[in-house]
Amino acid sequence: MNRRIGRNVRLILLPAICCAMSVYFGYTIVFGERGLMAWRQTQDELRLAQQDLASAKARREALQHRISLLDGKAIDADLLEEVAHSALLQTRSGEVAVPREKR
């Protein structure tokens, strides 16, 4: 009887270990630290970071263009007037200056 139980345990032990390992690794593949769910979250974070980078690049290009217009050799008259009005809040007769929030 004991031999029979021992033999049955040995016959079941290897498949049970393999099944347990398969369940463990399957769970880890889907829900683990570097699993499919974490990969999806990382992809979403990457997409947001790329959008932030694109908006920062656009803002930088706009500022570089504005700086190029304020170049000492050839200052754009309209931009100079706009900067002076916003800085000094001075107007000519008949004009109204409305201060804007700085971005």
Image (tube, grey):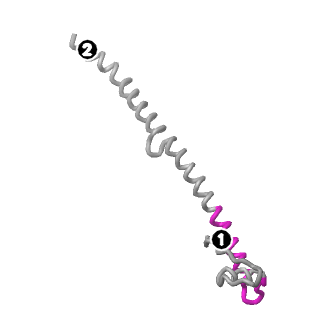
Q: Say which residue appears at 50% left-offset and 41% top-offset.
A: 37
Q: Position of residue 28 (x, y in %)?
A: 44, 38
Q: CA distance from mark 1 to mark 2?
A: 76 Å
> Quick one: label 1 or label 2, which is nearer the N terminus?
2
Which type of secondary structure does the marked residue at label 1 adopt? Answer: helix
Q: Residue at x 69, y 77 (%)?
A: 97
Q: Look at label 2 and name its amino acid.
A: Ile
Specify whether residue 70 is painted magenta: yes
Quadrant location of the N terminus in the rendered image:
top left
Q: How many other residues sit within 10 Å of disc 1, few (<14), some (14-19) or many (≥20)?
A: few
Callout 2: 10 Å neighbours few (<14), some, many (20+)? few
Task: Evaluate if marks 1 and 2 touch, with contact meaning CB atoms under 8 Å apart.
Answer: no
Nearer the observer, 98 or 38: 98
- Say if 75 sits above or below 103 in the image: below
Task: Please tell me whether mark 2 sits on a helix, a strand or a loop.
Answer: helix
**Residue drawn at the location 58% of the way across and 54% of the way down:** 48
Residue 18 percent across, percent down from the top left: 39, 28
Q: Please give the residue where the numbered disc 1 appears in the rendered image.
A: 60
> Start and end of the magenta stretch?
54-77
Q: Which mark is residue 5?
A: 2
Quadrant location of the C terminus?
bottom right
Q: Judge from the rendering whether residue 11 lies leftward or rightward of residue 22; answer left or right.
A: left
Q: Nearer the viewer, residue 71 or 6?
A: 71
